[in-house]
Image (cartoon, helix red, strand yellow):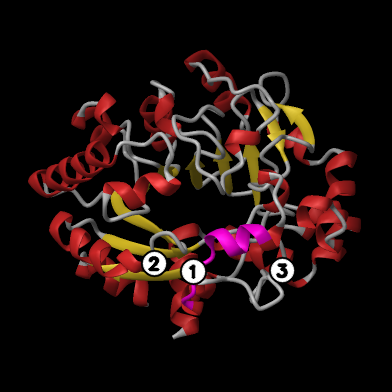
Amino acid sequence: MLLTKRLKILRAKGIRYGIKRTMSKLMPYFLLSHRKLVMLPTEIMIEPTAACNLKCPLCSNPTLTRTKGIMTLEMFDTILHNLDAPIKEATIGLTGEPLVNPHTFKFIKKLNSRGIKCSMPTNGVLFDRFSMDEIFDSGLHHTNIAIDGATEETYLKYRIGGDFNRLVKNLKTLCDEKRRRKAEYPIITMQFLVMKTNEHEIGAIKKLAEEIKPDRLHLKSAALWTSLTHKDRKDLAKDWLPSQGEFSRYDGDLLITEPVAVCPFAYDNSVILWNGDIALCCYDFDGKYIFGNLLKEKFSDVYHKEKYYQIRRKVLDQTLDICRECDITSATKTGKYIYFNKKLEKESAV
């Protein structure tokens, strides 16, 4: 089963990815002193904007100190021109809401034309700002839509500033349109972040998902981003962690039970902020560690800077402050999926 899964990943991402990922996992320190062996990443995160229309309690956005700007089409074109790496997959979004930017689907379409598979996490409230043609013609491969309540009252406890009825309508419209077009993509995931405030609605969200019929429902475990919310870890756990252990990524001491062996952002992934800055990782929301800017430099020049290698060593040693609080965990601890798309379920099981 494991071998079959590995072969599937290689077919999807290529031999180069397989070699690169194997080297970064098995000999990460060796690569620090043999830099000619370090390959450019095949995956990237691009932030269309740092602005958001909601104020969720466990999110970094409400306490963000950097400017919450929006990437323009001109900026994106320059960034794409300077992105001289063999990127195969891109996540569109970081701390802001991607749909706040009116150009997001134009960005996705341009990336898709270069053979880059795009995924987009979103709170989904602003989907109706875009036409169905714009969404489906962009080539978006996957969208993860957060709906953390099966009722308006519960939803608003976490998605502060959201609109439950508008979100549900957007979800239904998107899923109905996908079926009408008989489209394979985007894969539509309804995400339900399981917390103390909503765990009593797990049954209700399953029923709602059965009515809407996305490709799948993700019952996801929550992360306690202590430094980003400026709150004590124990207080956050008391307020938000569910009583059901299967939906928690923490042990009794609030430590990650299955941390990743080697951080993928050491060698295999990078983050581009809305202003072109190249940041360290998906946890560096405030852009504390910046290595260069794609409005001024080629990505390959930035990626091999001495400063980047110095920080990579600290990432591997987990001596950076953000590394010590990082809540990235193995796939088995991020929750579970319930599939409504049988073909996708079968493919995911391989």
Q: Tell me: residue 235, above or below residue 77.
A: below
Q: Is residue 147 visible?
A: no
Point out residue 64 in the picture as x, y percentages from the top left corner. 66, 32
Q: CA distance from mark 1 to mark 3?
A: 32 Å
Residue at 27%, 56% in the rendered image: 150
Residue at 78%, 36% in the rendered image: 288
Q: Earlier in the sequence, mark 2 or mark 3?
A: 3
Q: Quadrant of residue 250?
A: bottom right
What span is in magenta? 235-244
Is residue 161 found inside the magenta-colored segment of the image? no
Nearer to us: label 1 or label 3? 1
Point out residue 134 in the picture as x, y percentages from the top left corner. 26, 28
Kindly identify which numbered label has been placed on residue 199. Answer: 2
Q: CA distance from mark 1 to mark 2?
A: 6 Å
Q: Earlier in the sequence, mark 1 or mark 2?
A: 2
Q: Tell me: residue 300, above or below residue 242.
A: above
Q: Nearer the viewer, residue 205 or 5?
A: 205
| Kind of residue sitting beneath label 2 | Glu
Q: Are marks 1 and 3 in contact (CB under 8 Å)?
A: no
Q: Tell me: residue 170, above or below residue 213.
A: above
Q: Are marks 1 and 2 in contact (CB under 8 Å)?
A: yes
Q: Which residue is mark 3?
A: 25
Residue at 80%, 69% in the rendered image: 27
Point out residue 271 in the picture as x, y percentages from the top left corner. 64, 40
Q: Which residue is mark 1?
A: 242
Seen in the image, is 86 located left or right of residue 107? Answer: right
Q: Nearer the viewer, residue 297 or 72?
A: 72
Q: Earlier in the sequence, mark 1 or mark 3?
A: 3
Quarter that holds the N terminus: bottom left
Which residue extends farthest top? 74
Point out residue 281 in the picture as x, y percentages from the top left corner. 68, 46
Quarter that holds the C terminus: bottom left
